[in-house]
Amino acid sequence: LLVANVFFLITNIFLILTILDTPTNTYFPLIHHEQVDYYLYLAAIRESKEGAWETSAFYTSESTQRSFLYISFIVFGKIAAILNLSPEITYNIMRFVAIELIFIFIYVLCNQLLGKKWSIWAAFLSLFASVPAAEMLSILSIQSPQWWTDHLTAVSRMNLLPHHAMGI
């Protein structure tokens, strides 16, 4: 778990340095990846915090039915309302909680399946040995189709998509 948390800390160095470098009387919304997705998640948390149990379709001006599409952010919003936290703080706390839970889950699963002797190595490999397909194929000089997650490692994917980690 210590090694996993060191790698998780490394993936958040930019966020930490930006927080430390933010001038006083300036607002930094704790963005750690793409703004479009981040603000979508914050909007869902804010709607839920303000009482909504369903979210609207954020990418259209057409009239659509509200839905449970962003269920994890609806839950995050309810937690924000109970604890009186801002959506930005709530999102990042939930991101940290999600990744810690997934690290613990991976270790416990490996421990149950392989025993204590091999569980640390198996947990380490499960987190850090995944290499994006595009990088694997480029070694073989094969051009793969590009996808926005091609450059992400397993820890980076969990860090950028906390709702996926919470779903596991």
Image (tube, helix red, strand yellow):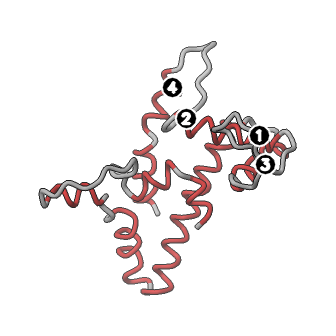
Cα separation, mark 3 vs mark 1, equals 7 Å
The amino acid type found where label 1 is placed reads Ser
In the rendered image, which quarter contains the C terminus?
bottom right
The amino acid type found where label 2 is placed reads Val
The amino acid type found where label 3 is placed reads Gln
Cα separation, mark 2 vs mark 1, equals 21 Å
Numbered tag placed on residue 65 in the rendering: 3
The residue indicated by pointer 2 is 36
Above or below, 68 against 17 in this view is below
Q: Residue at x 45, y 54 (%)?
A: 157
Q: Are marks 2 and 1 in contact (CB under 8 Å)?
A: no
The residue indicated by pointer 1 is 63
Q: Closer to us: mark 2 or mark 1?
A: 1
The residue indicated by pointer 4 is 20
Identify the secondary structure beneath mark 1: loop
Above or below, 112 against 162 in this view is below
Q: Closer to us: mark 2 or mark 3?
A: 3
Residue 79 visible here: no
Label located before the other in sequence (4 or 1): 4
Q: Position of residue 62 (x, y in %)?
A: 72, 37
Front residue (pair 110, 32): 32
Q: Are marks 3 and 4 in contact (CB under 8 Å)?
A: no
Cα separation, mark 2 vs mark 3, equals 22 Å
